[in-house]
Amino acid sequence: MSNSLDTYLILSGMLFAIGSFGFLARRNAISMLMSIELMLNAVNLSIVAFAAFGAFGTTQQGVGVGSVIALMVMAVAAAEATVGLAIVIAIYRNKRTPLVDEYDAMRQ
Amino acid sequence: MLRRILPALFGLAVMGAVLGIAALMLVVLGQDWEDALVWIFAAIMIGSGLLVVTMKDIIRCGLAMIVCFGALAGIYVILGSPLIAAAQVIIYIGAISVLILFAIMLTQTKDAPARLVFQTQAGAAAVASVVIAVVMALAISATDWGEIGQRVRLATDELAMVLFSDFILAFEVVSVLLLAAVVGAVFLAKREPGGPS
């Protein structure tokens, strides 16, 4: 079980589905950001699993190189979380609510 | 009294079931420790992930997200890349979770309706995400991975050499991106003088 790529990829798919449910269904903007973090982690898990099974190629010593991509994804996720939370706080300061269904200024 | 004990009992029962299945895998099915650990970490990860998207109290959602990230770090260790696991603990558990918890504390209002946590389309969203999970699982198990089915080593020293030789452009671009993100966040979250409170 721990030596098969399918295990990790199915786990990653389940975590991605959970995150997409949270993003579509929650009302709170910060809950939606947390769901996005879950989805990013699912993608990261699949990248590391592919790297551990040699899908991104290896060096001459037979060492997989794909984990570098996972590090890059983590850095970009950190930038995304910073800017996203700043935007949520800026909207909260104007609208006084964190619920996304009350952000309806462009609908009226 | 019973209502306060009941969730703790339920949690203990779930934990006992997970550990019992792990013991069953070790003893009866004859699988090794890695399989049992993968099962335990996967159960913790999926369970706390479900708690993140379903619980009412958003602070508890944030704490469950920390548990989910910790279990994922354990899976990275089992996959043989301790560097990624350490980065997961430092970046996600140490930085992003604390940032999210601070944002939760900054945006909670007393009059916000705490009961309605889901939009009206929650049922359709649940159906859609179950469909996503099932389609992904079917596609993964139907794929023949060919020659990439073998485990390779993920050594940290070699990874550092690759990071600072082949991926040096991406490394520098990421540092510029982080700088831009920090400046943008400070600009967005800054209070204007004379603006709304």
Image (cartoon, grey):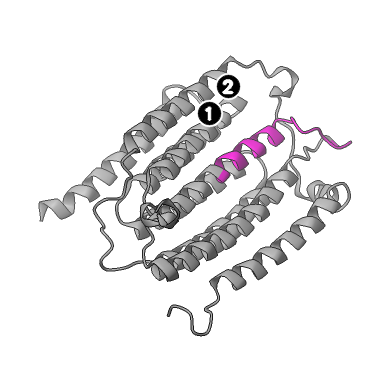
Q: Nearer the viewer, residue B162 or A33?
A: A33
Asked whether the beta carbons under mark 1 and mark 2 sit within 8 Å of each other, the answer is yes
Tell me: residue B175, above or below residue B157: below
Please rate how many residues cluster around mark 2, counting C-alpha atoms within 10 Å: few if below 14, some from 14 to 19, many from 20. some
Residue marked by disc 1: A10
Q: Which mark is residue B81?
A: none
Residue ID at (26%, 50%): B116
Looking at the image, residue B76 sits to the left or right of residue B41; the answer is right
Instruction: Return the x and y of residue A95 as percentages of the image width and height.
Output: 40, 66
Question: Which residue sits at x=79%, y=56%?
Answer: B173
Q: CA distance from mark 1 to mark 2?
A: 7 Å
* Badge number at residue B140: 2
Residue B51 on image: x %, y %: 36, 46
Q: Secondary structure at mark 1?
A: helix
The quadrant in which the C terminus of chain A is found is bottom left
Q: Nearer the viewer, residue A54 or B132?
A: B132
Specify the farthest residue to the front. Answer: A108
Q: Chain of mark 2?
A: B
Please state if B185 lies on the left or on the right of B60 as rendered.
Answer: right
**Secondary structure beneath disc 2?**
helix
Highlighted magenta segment, given as a residue range: A40-61
Q: Are marks 1 and 2 on the same chain?
A: no
The image quarter in which residue A51 lies = top right
Type of residue at label 1? Ile
Q: Which residue occupies 74% across, 37% down? A: B153
Q: Amino acid at mark 2?
A: Ile
- In this rendering, the answer to whether B110 lies above or below B21 is below
The picture places residue B17, in percent across and down from the top left corner, at 32, 35
